[in-house]
Amino acid sequence: METVLRAASMYLLLMVVFKVAGRRTLMEMNSFDLILLLIISEATQQALLGDDFSVTGAGLTIVTLIVIDILFGTLKTHFPRMEQLIDGFSLILVEEGKLLLRKRAKKAGIDEEDILQSARSTQGLERLDQIKFAILEKTGKISIIPKE
């Protein structure tokens, strides 16, 4: 039972940490983000398994994590508020060329340069006034809709 409790607590801890870290964490990774992810995964592995390096312990940990993920998926399906709590919601950052909700964007770790970079790479746009809408998606990606 200790393995199940370890797996469940680490799953919940990582969900909270990534929620607090903001959606920027989920965007394209740079080398620092990759190194951080590797360190987190090693620390998580140690916390999940403790001194138990048996195949049974690893299998039980994997099954526990998958069951928790399925449980959260089911909860999100039946309770829309739970989905917003776990996955967040899309957020309009730019409307008709004007940056909105600077405070929310900053909290999500997104700044004007991130929006412009997404606009350049996906739509070839160079300025905010060329953007009809910029939307921060649940996944952390920024969708750009250009002005016509």
Image: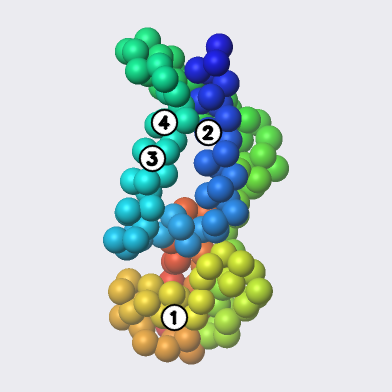
* Circle 4: element type: helix
Q: Quadrant of residue 42?
A: top left
**Residue at the spot of label 2:** 11
**Residue at the spot of label 1:** 113
**Do labels 3 and 4 touch, CB within 8 Å?**
no
Whether residue 137 is visible to the viewer of this picture, yes or no, is no
* Circle 3: element type: helix
In the displayed structure image, the side of residue 29 where residue 136 appears, left or right: right
* Front label number (3 vs 1): 3
In the displayed structure image, the side of residue 146 where residue 10 appears, left or right: right
What is the distance, in whole Å, between disc 3 and disc 1 at their CAs?
30 Å
Who comes first in sequence, dot 2 or dot 1?
A: 2
Determine crowd level at label 1: few under 14, some 14-19, many 20+ residues with C-alpha closer than 10 A. few
**Do labels 1 and 4 touch, CB within 8 Å?**
no
Residue drawn at 57 percent across, 64 percent down? 108
**Residue at the spot of label 3:** 41
* Circle 1: element type: helix
Q: Which mark is residue 55?
A: none
Q: Amino acid at mark 4?
A: Gln
In the displayed structure image, the side of residue 101 where residue 130 appears, left or right: left
